[in-house]
Every structure is written in structure tokens, then in C-alpha cells.
Amino acid sequence: MKRVLDYLWPMIGLAAVVFSGWLLYNELKGISAGDVMASLAAIPAHRWALAVLSTLAAYAALAWYDRIALQHLGHKLGWGFISVVSFTTYALSHNIGASVFSGAVVRYRAYSTKGLTAGEIGVLVALCSFTFALGTIVLGGIVLVGEPQFVQRLVDVPVWLARLAGFGMLAFVALYVAGSLLGLKPLRIGKFQLFYPRPEIVMRQLIAAPVELLAAAGIIYFALPAEAGISFFETLGAFLASFSAALLSHAPGGLGVLEFVFLKAVPGVQPADVIAALLVFRLLYLLIPLAFACVAVLAFERSKLSEAVKQERTN
């Protein structure tokens, strides 16, 4: 079964890239590379700076995900180590695809050196993933309640149903908070116990996740022309839909999926401007972090190799 899964995820990702690439081609076949380059060149320096600041805020919030999970587990590690591990994890997993699995490998390699067991690292990975999902549910619920007609750009559903779905999402979050306040008993799986997060942990989740998603959406918003006539609220809705679709597709970096869904979500904006903004997002949020993450992994493995060699010599 494991060998089948080893081939299944890459095949799913490849199929998603090919299919979304075909859809994207049909959307963009009337746009030239020159149009996109002109849109990139038209981005003012101050909006580039705001996009960079948004990237830093997003990755700082992602590091907070790990810290929250470690606090839930009762482990105290330095912010510096957590930040490097989190940055490396997300930079690699966002680009590779199948983020839960690729992120688990990086975290296990790093946190196991600090005394965390495989079970604890599994809980940490799950809680970080749930924190992200929680933020998506919170902000997605707000978008659907506040502007339910937005969803009709992507799916043909009645406005009342979209708003009802939004209220349902927010109700789920309220139940999650209520469960924490009530102190529900831990879930037992054999000898393993999964404890419900304490109220202070839940409150931090409800801050960290929306901050990360708002900052990530801000990268695209600041890269779009100010005169495009798209609000931050609309950009946020388009980002939540496209980024979620990209993650679910398991396509490496959500290639093609992100662009196709985002274009469908903002039909009033010039496609060349949208593609230029998404290129900025990929550069700042995906590609540059990936380069730094590769350096961090090499440095970490080199240090561990040096420690092993020294230990061998002393023995």
C-alpha cells in the first residue's frame, strides 16, 4: 500500500498540473508575455515594499503555528530554532506539494533532535495543519457571510446557500472554541491520548492563522494595480479559494491551479495584471523562500554530519 501511495501523490500532482495548465492556456491565449512584463514593470516601488513586508508577516505567523503546537505539547524551544524549522518546512512543502507529508519529514528531522517523539511530532504536524484550516474556515466564513455573491464567480449556487455555508463555517469555529472552554476529555487511541487544546492555545490559533492568510493575500493585493478596482476583501476571497484549491490539488506549488482559480474569481481585472501579481506572489512567497530553505537544509545536515564525525573520532 505504501508503495502505491508513493506513486499516487506524484501522479495526482502531475495530472493536476497538466489539466490546470490546459485550462489556464485557454484563459490566457489572448495575452502576450509583453503584456505581463508591462504589468510587472508598472508596479510602484512602495507597493513592492508592502508586498515584501506582507511576505515577512506571513512567514512570521507560520512560525507562530509551530510555537503554538509546541506550547500545546508542553515543549519550550527557542524562537530562532522554531522560525528556521517552520520557514524551511513551509518553503519546501508549498513548492513540493502534498504539504502535510513533506512538512512532516522536515519537522521530524529537526524536532526529533530536540527530544520530541514521533507521536508528538505527528500531533504537532496535525495541529499546524488544523490551525491553517481553522484560519481558512474563519476568513472563508466571513467572506461568504459578508459577500455571498462572490462565490457565484466560481460555482453556480444561490446567494442564500453561500451565506448559509458561511454561517455554518463560523458555527463550526464557535463549537471548536466551546469545546476548549468546556475542557472536553482527551481522545484515547489505544495507549495514545489526544488532548483538546486549552483555551489560550485556541485563542492563539484564531489570531495566528487569519494573520498569516491576510498577509499572504496582501502580497497579491499590493502587486495588483491600485486602479484595478478590486478591494482587499475581494482579493482575500479569491486568494482563499485559489490557494485552497492549489493545496488540495497536490500540484507542486499549485502550478496552474492557483492562477486558473484566481482568474475566475476576479473577472473584472485585466488578466495580464492578475498574472503579474501572481508571479510576484510566487517569487516572494514560494521561490525566494525555497532558495533559502535549501541552504538551511544543507547547513543543518552539514552540522549533523560534523557532529557525527566528531563523535566517531572521540569513540
Image: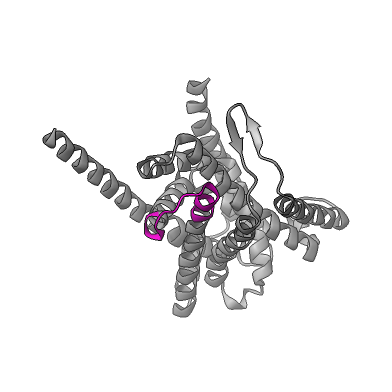
Give residue 112's position: percent from left, percent from top: 39, 40
Q: In this view of the protein, can residue 26 be seen by the observer?
A: no
Q: How is the image coloured?
A: one colour
- Find out whether residue 140 is within the magenta segment: no
Q: Nearer the viewer, residue 212 or 312?
A: 312
Give residue 39's position: percent from left, percent from top: 50, 70
Give residue 6's position: percent from left, percent from top: 48, 27
Q: Nearer the viewer, residue 81 or 229?
A: 81
Q: Nearer the viewer, residue 121 or 50?
A: 121
Magenta stretch mostly in which secondary structure? helix
Q: Nearer the viewer, residue 20 or 122?
A: 122
Q: Give the side of residue 3 with respect to residue 295, left or right.
A: right
Furthest residue toward top? 1
User: Where is 264 relative to 8, above or below?
Assistant: below
**Magenta span of residues:** 66-81
Point 25% across, 42% down: residue? 304
User: Where is 297 relative to 150, above or below?
Assistant: above
Point 60% across, 43% down: residue? 248
- Find out whether residue 73 is within the magenta segment: yes
Q: In this view of the protein, can residue 206 be seen by the observer?
A: yes
Image quadrant in which the C terminus is located: top left
What is the count of numbered marks?
Answer: 0
Furthest residue toward left? 313
Q: Give the side of residue 265 with respect to residue 118, left or right.
A: right
Give residue 89's position: percent from left, percent from top: 43, 48
Point 47% across, 79% down: residue? 46
